Image (cartoon, rainbow, N blue to C red):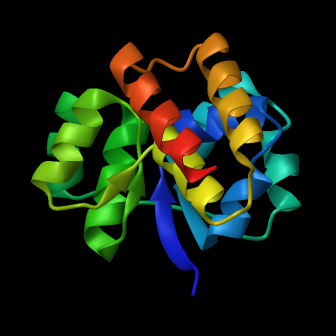
Amino acid sequence: MKSVIVSDTTSLIVLEKLASLGLLCKLFEQILIPAVVLAELQAGSPDITAQLAHLPCFTVVDVPASKRLTALLLLLDAGEANAIELATSLNLPLIIDERKGRQIAKQFGIRITGFAGLLIQANRSKLVDTHTALAMLDEAVTNGLRLAPSLQQQVRDVLEQAS
């Protein structure tokens, strides 16, 4: 059974650059995107709304103001803060890549994954073969995804063991 997950901006940007947003629809039944995250995506990709319209697994959600959200906005950018607030309020896992955001999400007890975790999950689910997954990892890093070299190597090792 596929599940529901909340997403921050970074992995969506990476997947869009890889023309692989649809991969999330194969991994999850529904991906909730805070409206603020959609606005961040539109800033770098004006046609993102049209792309998402063709992928019915994506749902844009208005995140209501709360004391917790106000506090999160003091620590994180708006997309991260809204994604963490939404995941916390709905008790859902979260796709988030930025280190500070991941640390704060963990403090709230949120289950997290990021681009690297999604790639491994897609490979284990046989949605992406090992060669393609490794190429996607390389292209994501080339396109600006910041992953520590040690984490890149860990991901490579996991993917290569799966083949």
Furthest-left residue in view?
A: 107
Q: Nearer the viewer, residue 99 or 77?
A: 99
Question: Is residue 82 in sight in this rendering?
Answer: yes
Of 79 and 96, which appears nearest the observer? 96
Residue at 24% in and 50% down: 69
Q: Residue at x 16, y 62 (%)?
A: 109
Q: Which residue lies most toward the bottom here?
A: 1
Against 90, residue 33 (above or below) is above
Residue sitting nearer the eye, 101 or 49: 101
Q: In the image, is 70 to the left or to the right of 147?
A: left
Where residue 84 sits: x, y (%)? 31, 52
Q: Position of residue 49 (x, y in %)?
A: 79, 47
* Side of 141 relative to 18 (left or right): left
Quadrant of the rendered image containing residue 112: bottom left
Using the image, determine if residue 130 lies above or below residue 150.
below
Q: Residue at x 77, y 39 (%)?
A: 132
Residue 8 in view (yes/no): no
- Position of 33 with respect to 102 (left or right) is right
